[in-house]
Amino acid sequence: MNVYITDGTEECFYTAVFNACTDRDCVVTSSHTVQLSLGASVTAVRTDRQKCERVRNKLTEYAPHSLRDVSVILRRGSSDKEQVALEYIRLIVQKKSPVGGMLSHPAVIAARDEMKKVTLEAHRFKGFLRFMEAQGGIYYAPFAPDNDILEMILPHFIARLKNQPFIIHDTLRGKAALYNTKECVVAATGEKVDVPLSECEAHFQALWKEYYAAVNIASRPHEKQMKNYMPVRYWKFMPEKRG
Amino acid sequence: MIDAERLKILTESAKYDVSCSSSGSGRKNTKGGIGNADAAGICHSFTPDGRCISLLKILLSNRCCYNCLYCPNRAEADVPRASATPDEICQLVMAFYKRNYIEGLFLSSAVEGSPDSTMERLLDTVIRLRKIYRFNGYIHLKGIPLADRSLISRAGLYADRMSFNVELPSERSLRLLAPQKSKEGVLMPMKQLAAEKKAVGEEKGKHRHVFLPAGQTTQLIVGASPESDGQILKLSQAMYRRFSLKRVYFSSYIPVVRHSLLPDKCAGLLREHRLYQADWLMRFYGFSAEEIAGKGENLPEEYDPKCAWALRHMQYFPVEVNAAPLEALLRVPGIGNLGAYKIVRARKYAKLDFDDLAKMRIVLKRAKHFITCGGKFFGSENVNTVKTMLALEDKGPRYEQLSLFSTPETSLSALTGQL
Ligand code: SF4
């Protein structure tokens, strides 16, 4: 069995697909903790622009939206994401057409599940992200999502807060989007950055906590539902839940 | 800037309005502006009662000159009073919005002074937000019944959504429990706004107005007065049709006030939940109010209204999953909107059997009694056995979990799967 290890980029994944697509008994992964079975032969894939482009062109020809789908799947924070994407691509290549409607096919079910987890989290963070006003009027929002969604939520915040300079920081993946009201760049960062807050920040956080406490109907507790909709692991950066 | 004390009073007075939705508007940001609206709505937080926070829900004032019996802010009540200035509200909205705490504002007020002066202050707040603060986020404005027509019209040009709450499902109950209000006083402005929205919608050309892009909603209190579910559903249906309402919210009565004319117990969440299920059937499943419950009837407690309907109409079942039209699939208990669409899409590619349905996460526990897959039937033929099984199915805490007592937008689609 062949195991193709990629560097985690889309280009490298498509390069691997070039061979893996017809290699029935193989695994593609970017995970370094993959369990190797006996007799597996491991290939570390190096990005090859030509191969990558050829795969992309074929896919676009068969199924115009497939590149977007694959890109969403590859943002999953799970170790078998490449394998799910590969099975999905294999089906497209086999059918030579879009397969999104084949809702009872295992490869499509798996692909849709992964996509949904990513898009759901991206949707949630449109709401759960919390900015703090830093000195100098820049707004800083740290978060640690399960999936790699920073680039997916950026357009939303740029459209909404277009006159407000901000930083959105994925502390888990060590990268941040820096927006200065004109342009936006994504840069690598450390896990922690020191951001001195503005004078009024503590005051507004206190008002928000006051509001949060007052709007709750205490005679109808339903903590389970709260936690279902707003998982505890997201609370770390939310002033109303930080105590 | 508003202080914590007043914020608390004005929030606690506003929180029993169940609507917190921020959906239905696609308002765009403007040059030099801040904010926009997301058509699907966004939840920003959840409180320990399981409800979503989307908007800053607050009163401009809780100093009321009316005396609605069920209301903690009624004139005679001995409660702490407070009010905020329009500018204080604007500043708070901006500070919260910039930090991404909220989608926008849900502003309401007790009737302080007169309906006109109250409506004027509400309008002033909204115009300030839009014009001075250049705020393009979501605004839901509660209308004050009996305020001047022109004030109400103008509000429609700045708000995304407006609501006049009917509260009590009949004129009689209204007269008894809210003596200064009348059904006409609430329905008139709803009618006016619906007509004006329609007129604006027909405008042509470049400078068309935006008028209540997210439409109107209303709220009915359930369990404070004796009306039956059938009556409540019929009223809802009439309002959906006549005023093109986006939503009717049901709020199960919470006794915050003791009075001999009022029940002293909370109306059960189950009743509220059943009404929401029935409401979904009317809006998304092609049912009419009359099909769901007769005029004096209440919805059954044991199972959801779709099950109840199906059990009364066993002659239409079972339907064949691989052939039945969408409308018939939508009427199968246990198959939701999403499920029905999935089936219709998937069966174009492959014939579906029970395994396929399970893989597609279509819950078969209830549905199996009402469908066949490729001619196969796995349900029970005996209606009484089916009834017992469905009732058992519905037991447990599920209704609570699903209570639409302000359910976040994102979970609504999941909910359709349950009917
Ligand atoms: S008008 Fe009636 S419901 Fe509204 S605040 Fe006054 S007393 Fe309460």
Image (cartoon, rainbow, N blue to C red):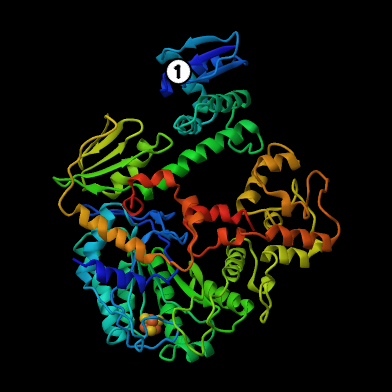
Q: Inspect this view and state whether residue A53 appears.
A: no
Q: Residue at x 45, y 18 (%)?
A: A6
Query: Quarter containing ligand 1?
Result: bottom left
Query: Where B303 falls versus B99 (above or below)?
Result: below
Nearest to the observer: residue B337 or residue B197 = B337
Report the number of numbered marks. 1
Left or right: A165 in relation to A7: left
Q: Residue B271 sits in which quadrant?
A: bottom right
On-image quarter of the N terminus of chain B? bottom left
What is the secondary structure assignment of the residue under circle 1? loop
The residue indicated by pointer 1 is A6
Nearest to the observer: residue B70 or residue B208 = B70
Which chain letter matches label 1? Answer: A
Query: Where A144 falls versus B392 (above or below)?
Result: above
Name the spot of residue B265 as percent of width and height, x first. Answer: 54, 78
Name the spot of residue B223 as percent of width and height, x first. Answer: 56, 78
Q: Residue at x 61, y 59 (%)?
A: B397
Name the spot of residue A49 as percent of width and height, x first. Answer: 40, 15
Left or right: B313 in relation to B204: right
